[in-house]
Image (cartoon, grey):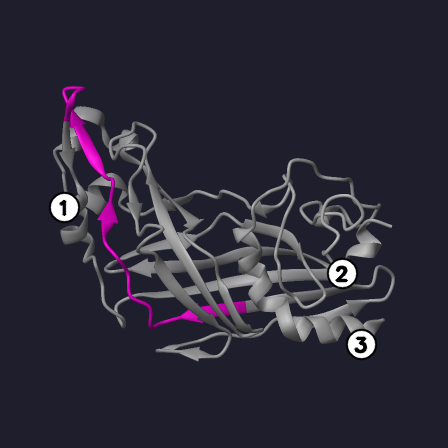
Amino acid sequence: MKSKFYARLAACAGAAALAVALMAPMAQAETPAPGYSQFAGCPSPKSENPAISTCITSTITGGNLHLGNKETKITNPITLSGGVNEFSEGFSFTSKGGLSKAKQKVEGGVIGLTGLTWLAEFLGVDALTLYATAELAGTPKINNVEDLILPLKVHLENTTGVLGPSCYIGSNSNPIKLHLVTGTSGNLTGKAPEYVFDPATEIVKGTNGTFVDGTFSAPGANGCRLILFGFIPISLDGTINLVSGLPAASGKNFTSQNYNIEIVEAGLVYP
């Protein structure tokens, strides 16, 4: 049983930590057996998805995403959960799985992003706090356990709605295409997780892994707009691009993402 898990691990462990987020959720979710509650996002092979063979859950514990001349630190953990078939393909998840939405506070706020200092006079600095949320912008490509291509877009949000509801860096048609590896990328070097097997639960646990990418390019802003006097829309895309150094070619962007992962047979989660 132990060797069986490690064989699967070589095919999907690190990549699945992020790729599982792309799956379309199912309507219902069964309850995992005691001791396996962390796999609630994995579909039951008996009643939800018969192709599911392995359940996976992962948490991005920290890191950063640097686009142009702006950097966002990952301070709020992001949980990813789902399952794959016996070939480590066909990712899917229940309504309890997928990618959790974790807003990350952006240093400098809206003023730092746009350079529009006069906004503070109208709204106050506290009302210009800015958050960034990474969202999926396509289907990832898994080359191997240490090589993952992940398309993303970053949603920029403000509680007062200064940037509008649809302000993004990147889009589905023009994503931030991360090429994440645990080896070397540009000037960065990642690290594969340290894996152990828990004989009591038959769960493979990987800790302290790091994905990096120091070579990707970053697209510009889209859908960002300021509404003056409640009805006059002014596009902020160009302003944000100018201040933030976007679009940015390869070599000017980088990311480092720390993560833990757990993998187990679906039959143990849903006996």
Image location of residue 240, percent across then percent down: 19, 47
Between disc 2 and disc 1, whose residue precedes?
A: 1
Residue 239's tag is 1
Between disc 3 and disc 2, whose residue precedes?
A: 3
- Asked if the magenta segment contains residue 118, the reply would be no
Which segment is the magenta one? 210-232
Q: Is residue 263 left or right of residue 176?
A: right
Q: Is residue 44 above or below residue 91?
A: above
Image location of residue 141, percent across then percent down: 49, 66
Q: Nearer the viewer, residue 196 or 138?
A: 138
Helix, strand or loop for disc 1: helix
C-beta proximity under 8 Å, tags 2 and 1:
no
Residue holding disc 3: 3
Q: Amino acid at mark 3?
A: Ser
Q: Nearer the viewer, residue 222 or 64?
A: 222
Image location of residue 21, percent across then percent down: 54, 52
Residue holding disc 2: 264
Helix, strand or loop for disc 3: helix
Separation (CA) of disc 3 from disc 2 = 12 Å
Separation (CA) of disc 2 from disc 1 = 48 Å
